[in-house]
Amino acid sequence: MQILEVENLSLQYGEQIILDQVSFSTKERKIVGLLGSNGAGKSSIIKILAGLVFPETGNLFLKK
């Protein structure tokens, strides 16, 4: 069963595109890591998941 689904997240600050149509999902009881170079958007994804920042487009589904 999928516990977290992220579909087509996009985030932009002014002219700077931070996230461009990012999608992923994870199953229950799995550990997930975000890997990428500096400026890849890892922290921005965490901020969106925490509700600190809202994406321009996309959907988040968290199942209980």
Image: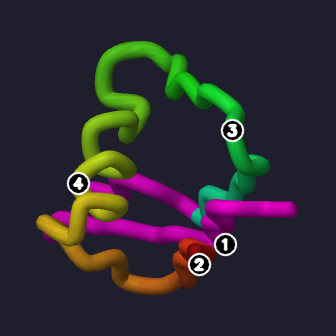
Q: Quadrant of residue 11?
A: bottom left
**Residue appearing at x 42%, y 31% in the figure:** 40
- Disc 4 vs disc 2: Cβ atoms closer than 8 Å? no
- The numbered dot on residue 47 is 4
Q: Earlier in the sequence, mark 1 or mark 2?
A: 1
Question: Given the image, on which type of amino acid does mark 2 rest?
Answer: Phe
What is the C-alpha distance between the residues marked 4 and 1?
A: 16 Å
Badge 2 vs badge 3, beta-carbon distance below 8 Å? no
Q: Main secondary structure of the magenta part?
A: strand
Quarter of the view holding residue 30: top right
Q: Give the CA distance from mark 2 to mark 3.
A: 16 Å
- Figure colour scheme: rainbow
Amino acid at the residue labelled 4: Lys
Q: Is 18 included in the stretch rendered in magenta?
A: yes
Q: Earlier in the sequence, mark 2 or mark 3?
A: 3
Q: Which residues are magenta?
A: 1-20
Of 40 and 24, nearer the camera is 24
Residue 43, horizontal then vertical, whole percent: 27, 38
User: Badge 2 is on which residue?
Assistant: 61
Sequence-wise, the earlier of marks 4 and 1 is 1
Query: Where's residue 52, x and y in %?
Result: 13, 66
Residue 62 inside the magenta-drawn segment? no
The label number, if any, that marks residue 29 in the structure image:
3
Q: Which residue is mark 1?
A: 7
Q: Is residue 43 above or below residue 35?
A: below
Query: What whole-number distance in Å separates the C-alpha atoms at marks 4 and 2?
Result: 15 Å
Q: Amino acid at mark 1?
A: Glu
Residue at point 69%, 38% (across, down): 29
